[in-house]
Structure formats: C-alpha cells, structure tokens
Image (tube, rainbow, N blue to C red):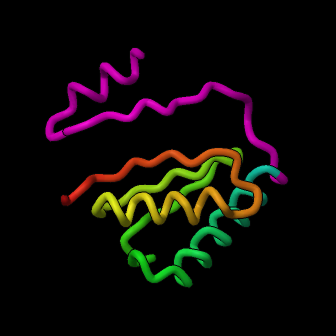
C-alpha cells in the first residue's frame, strides 16, 4: 500500500493496478518456465486474428501472465481467452487501456 501511494504521487500517473507480491527470489527453473509461457502465449497470439499480436505486451511471473496494451474491449477479451488457455498459465491479469 505504501508503494501504491508513492506511485500515485508521480506526475502523469493515470491509474494504478496494485499486483505486488512479496516472495522469495525466483529460481532459474521458475524464470525459464515463465519465459516458455510468455513465448507460448505470444505464439498463440500470432495465430489469432481477433486482435493484433503486436499491440499487446505479455509478461509472465510465477505462472501469472500480465497483459498490457491499448485495445478495445473485444480485443482484450480475446487476448485474455487465448492467454488463459495456454499451457502453464495459472492466472491472467489484464492491465489494458481501452479505446472504446
């Protein structure tokens, strides 16, 4: 909560999604698995024609996939659906800015 307050006072910050998790250092195996998950999600994005794969950034941490980008609601839902159906994904967090 303290970090959220600090970030809220930074100029031009419009919205904050507090998804901070306190945990130990991740293992090499965990980081490698996250990289594989991110690659798999991005590959599946390329095959889906409901949204542009290049308009969505994918970051994975401990099996949680974070999706970021400027999209409309239909694109966000499609991307979230594709990501959540990918192997190894335990959770999807949408951090989109919507244009519609």
The picture quadrant where one finds residue 53 is bottom left
Residue 65: x %, y % from top left: 59, 52
Q: Image point 57% across, 48% down: which residue?
A: 92
23 or 38, which lies in front? 38
Residue at x-position 59% and y-position 29%: 21
Q: Nearer the viewer, residue 42 or 32?
A: 42
> Where 30 sits versus 51, above or below?
above
Residue 10 vs residue 91: left or right?
Answer: left
* Magenta span dominant secondary structure: loop
Q: Is residue 88 above or below residue 24?
A: below
Up the image or down, 52 lies above or below 81; here it is: below
| Total marks placed | 0
Q: Does 2 appear in magenta? A: yes
Q: Is 42 on the left or on the right of 14, as rendered?
A: right
**Picture residue at 63% right of the left edge, 46% below the top:** 64
Q: Is residue 64 left or right of residue 69?
A: right
Q: Give the quadrant of residue 42.
A: bottom right
Residue pictured at 21% horizontal, 25% vertical: 9
| Quadrant of the frame with the N terminus | top left
**Image quarter in which the C terminus is found:** bottom left
The percent position of residue 48, horizontal first and vertical second, equals 51, 80
Q: Is residue 40 left or right of residue 2?
A: right
- Which of the two residues, 2 or 95, is positioned nearer the viewer here? 95
> Residue 99 in magenta?
no
Q: Residue furthest toward the left?
A: 12
Q: Position of residue 86 (x, y in %)?
A: 68, 63
The residue sitting at the top extreme is: 2
User: Which region shows up in magenta?
Assistant: 1-29
């Amino acid at each position: 909560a303290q970090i959220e307050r600090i970030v809220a006072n930074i100029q031009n910050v419009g919205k904050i999604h507090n998804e901070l998790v306190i945990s130990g250092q991740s293992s090499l195996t965990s980081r490698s698995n996250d990289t594989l998950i991110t690659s798999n999600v991005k590959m599946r994005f390329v095959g889906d024609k409901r949204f542009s794969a290049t308009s969505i950034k994918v970051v994975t941490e401990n099996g949680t996939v974070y999706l970021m980008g400027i999209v409309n609601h239909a694109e966000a839902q499609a991307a979230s659906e594709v990501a959540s159906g990918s192997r190894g994904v335990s959770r999807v967090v949408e951090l989109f800015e919507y244009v519609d």
